[in-house]
Amino acid sequence: MAKQRVVVVGGGLAGLAASMRLAEAEVQVDLVSSVPVKRSHSVCAQGGINYANPVTKQQGDSEWKHFDDTVYGGDFLQHQPPVKEMCEWAPRVIDLLDRLGVPFNRAADGHRAHRRFGGTLYERTAFAGATTGQQLIYALDEQVRRWEVEGRVTKYEFWDFLKPILDDNGVCRGAVVMDMMSMEIRSLPADAVVLATGGCGLIFGRSTMSMNSTGSANSRAYQAGVRYANGEFIQVHPTAIPGVDKLRLMSESARGEGGRVWVPRQPGDTRGPRDIPESERWYFLEERYPTYGNLVPRDIATREIFSVCREGFSVDPDAYCVYLDLTHIDRAELDRKLMGILEIYEKFQGVDPRVEPMKIFPAVHYSMGGLWCAFEKDEATGGLNVGSPRNQLTNVPGLYAIGEADYQYHGGNRLGANSLLSCIFSGLIVAPGIVHHLKNLPHGGVGDQPASRFDGAAAACKRHYDDLVNNDGGENPYELHMTLGDEMTRNVTVVRNNRDLEATVTKIQELQERFKKVTVPDKSGWTNQPVVYTWALGDMLVLAEVIAQGALLRNECRGAHYKPAFDMPKMDADEPVELRRQARRWCDAFGKKNEQWLKSTVAEHTPDGPRICYEAVDVSLIPPRPRTYGLVGAEVIEQTWREATASVVEPKTEAATAS
Amino acid sequence: MDRNFQLVVKRQDQPEEPVRWETFPIPHRPQMNVISCLQYVAAHPVTAEGRSTTPVAWESNCLEEICGACTMIINGRVRQACTALVDTLLSETPDAIRLEPMTKFPVVRDLVVDRSRMFEQLKRVKAWIPVDGYYDAGPGPVTSPADQEKAYPLSQCMTCGCCVEACPQVNDNSDFIGPAAISQAIYFNTNPTGKLNAHERLDALLAPGGISDCGNAQNCVEVCPKEIPLTESIAQAGRDTTFYVIRRWLNH
């Protein structure tokens, strides 16, 4: 019998981790990627990767605290068992990367150096300069190349994923793919398909994401019947620099190494930043969040930047912009730890950030949502049953989702330096589950399928290709994309309201109609990039509706999803008794909000747009609590909440004492 | 500066098709780079003569000079299109920016070339750490900050092709593996675990097309966008292979 094959789509950290682990388990892997895998978007990750490390553990940290920080950071929207398992694996994952040769920065004693990231008080983050993603992906790329030489991995680089192939029982039997050079369309039969296809930043036009982060592969899976969850949770990173072609990230590690965010205390101050004395600078994050300071989680930092800019404190008249200041830090230290991003700033802005504070802007950065997938909880540990074929499995048997393409690990807001971890972890953990799946295939193996199934699937995609190329309605795909990006950025990012969201849903539907009249400006059959782009755009328009519709329906504030109309009650009383009363009202509202909205949005594709339902979140390990991050003035909420929740268990204790 | 400038692009529809030049008028905007010019052309594929044409094919992904995809020849110099800023280029050549595909790789279409040879060369020099497996086996070797600071620059190679393009020894008549692969061999040979099979990489460097084909032109280090000390790697490779040959001879 021929060896069983698995198709892995996407060669970023998740896809590479899955590929090398499957190859190790003697599974034949067909690795499909729209770019040479070494050029995948994971290279853009800068700051580092989190784990409870030997140093932090002596300061009171643990895998449990990493888990707690992650779900608190995610505003409790994640199922907890997979997150717990990930945080427990984290030290082993970083050890593995270390053994694979990743040149992590070192402390004087030769052990790995660490720095602090957002949403934690521990220096939990290992890093390789400010190009950690690049260094990690190279290590995994090298391992997969090794397996390629051994004959266990076959790469399909510059191939685009078009759709999964499903049999009559709804089981995934492979994928249709297209060679982006020769435009050949063919089926790759497989006993399992893994989608490691990343995020969807290009739906927002310009973002910090790479040009292939269109979300089109995820949309194609969605249109084939895979559920898409929590689409409305889009991370807007607080610190990026604008460009005509894209927005470029300035890593959170800049703040982890001591960078400070500020604006002049005087709105519209025309002096250069270096001419503004210390006493006339407003370090608003440090002032409002003295415990976490500049390292509050991204959703909060971004909202605070928006808020001070709306009050007139922006340092750029045309945009929401604040200073990120590194100039007080020793030059050599900066070069050693942040060189990668300093160079980016210097090359694109023409200003040396060691000398002059950086001007930074919020930018769309990450999709917490993604393809819905399952997990199997180990009741004994509260974590995962490792090796279960249900881990990372979508609702389509045989079709798995990992990395940024899945929705599993980050809830309502991702913490910095957790994405490299979730990508690699989900890639590593999907492999043993697939090995199990291959031994117990539902309705027989792919070899039992008629050849016509695969020929038919490829032929259908070829017809789609021909239709697209021959269409001549005159709509310009690049202009449609720009309109979509502007609309999504304006109404579906940091501050959302239902009237605008309704308008956006209508606008997206209009764009979908206009797309039917799209003209591809290249009719050739060789390296036709416009047809690849236009095909992706059609699928982005479908996913955009999922995102906007999810945002419209979710009437609450949670993580990155912020609707002022449904904000928590105000806490503005001066008088202590009234303040306590307000805090109680706040806590009541918090409880009700969780009853109503602590659930994942789950979208199913229909020809009339997404059908949305909700799924309860597994919060069996850490009960949800108010997420204040030590905001000045919110102590009374914390205290009231503690008292309220303590009183639930206290009667028992009292009864025991009384008897 | 609200003015137009011209983007002059060397084009070729397919590998065997003839080469032609096309000129595109680009409206100037602040903070443009060459990528944004090509994006503009994609949306407005009309030449300066007013003739409709196809969008230019080019490779790109990250747009922040970390993926290595968008390497091309810009105003005669090999580099990434994303960090090629229009205002800087126009200060050198005021009215036009010229784009050409790299010449040391087969052209696929327009500015897209086939760099798969570079990835094949990484196989030749076994550019990986030969770990036993992916199960938990504790941390990697303790490494001094000084060693990390030496290794990290070498590990930043994006396989972008600049050094290969600039190297006179890489040509139609040679099988030279080029500076990038040599530097990667040295990178893995200095890793404490990678060192364990250093001899295999040195064998690869001693094979035809290996280190002896380097002509010491030193162009590679000039064009490397990551400022990787490629000539130091090559010098190291020269020393290491020499000692390796002597040792091998003594042991026989």
Image (cartoon, helix red, strand yellow):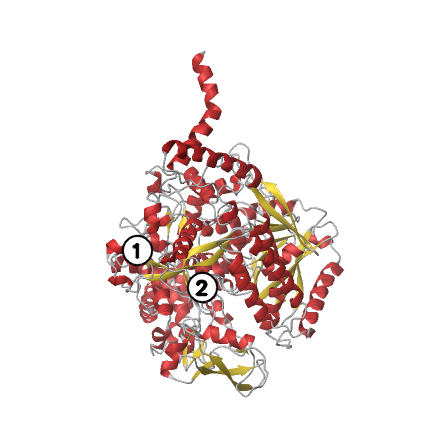
Amino acid on which the number 1 mark rests in the picture: Arg
Indicate the position of residue A43 as horizontal and vertical percent values.
45, 60
> Disc 2 marks which residue?
A247
Mark 1 secondary-structure assignment = loop
Q: Chain of mark 2?
A: A
Mark 2 secondary-structure assignment = loop
Residue visible at 51% across and 83% down in the picture: B24
In primary-sequence order, the first of circles 2 and 1 is 2
Give A591 or A216, whichever is nearer the viewer.
A591
Binning the other alpha carbons within 10 Å of mark 1 as few (below 14), some (14 to 19) or many (20 upward) gives some
Amino acid on which the number 2 mark rests in the picture: Leu
Q: Which mark is residue A265?
A: 1
Give B45 or B227, whichever is nearer the viewer.
B45
How far is mark 2 from mark 1, CA to CA?
27 Å
Camera-nearest label, 2 or 1? 1
Whether residue B141 appears in this view of the structure is: no
Give A268 or A175, whichever is nearer the viewer.
A268
